[in-house]
């Protein structure tokens, strides 16, 4: 392998490196999208878990309002 072909090979690798600005920007967008979807799923799971629970404060307020209306 000659020095010129090695230099060309290195240049080709640098040109296709994933740290190029446009590729990095795409990675940032993809990471942001994954994070957004992760948070959305986390919120959905939290709401799903809370759906089966009874809010005792609301029940107490409801009963107090009912008793006052008698």
Image: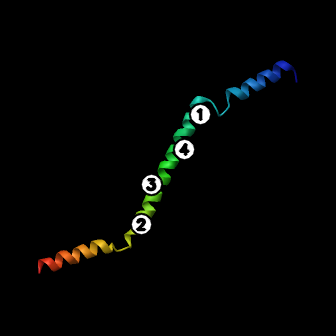
Q: Which residue lies at the image location 44% right of the left edge and 63% below the top edge?
A: 46
Which residue extends farthest right? 1
Tag 1 residue = 23
The residue closer to the viewer here, 60 or 49, is 60
Mark found first going from the N terminus, 1 or 3: 1
Circle nearer the viewer, 1 or 3: 3
Mark found first going from the N terminus, 4 or 2: 4
In the figure, is residue 8 to the left or right of 55? right
Color style of the picture: rainbow
Tag 4 residue = 31
Task: Kindly state the secondary structure of the residue where label 3 is placed.
Answer: helix
Q: Which residue lies at the image location 73% right of the left edge and 23% below the top edge?
A: 11
Tag 2 residue = 48
Q: Which residue lies at the image location 38% right of the left edge and 73% below the top edge?
A: 53
Marks 1 and 3, how far apart in space? 26 Å
Are there few (<14), some (14-19), or many (20+) residues within 10 Å of tag 1? Answer: few
- Estimate the x, y position of residue 61 in percent, counting from the top left: 24, 73
Which residue extends farthest left? 70
Tag 3 residue = 40
Are there few (<14), some (14-19), or many (20+) residues within 10 Å of tag 2? Answer: few
- Estimate the x, y position of residue 32 in percent, counting from the top left: 51, 44
């Amino acid at each position: 392998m000659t020095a010129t072909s090695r230099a060309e090979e290195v240049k080709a690798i640098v040109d296709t490196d994933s740290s190029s600005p446009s590729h990095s920007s795409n990675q940032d967008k993809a990471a942001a999208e994954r994070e957004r979807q992760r948070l959305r799923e986390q919120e959905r799971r939290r709401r799903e878990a809370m759906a089966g629970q009874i809010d005792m404060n609301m029940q107490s307020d409801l009963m107090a309002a009912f008793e006052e209306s008698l």
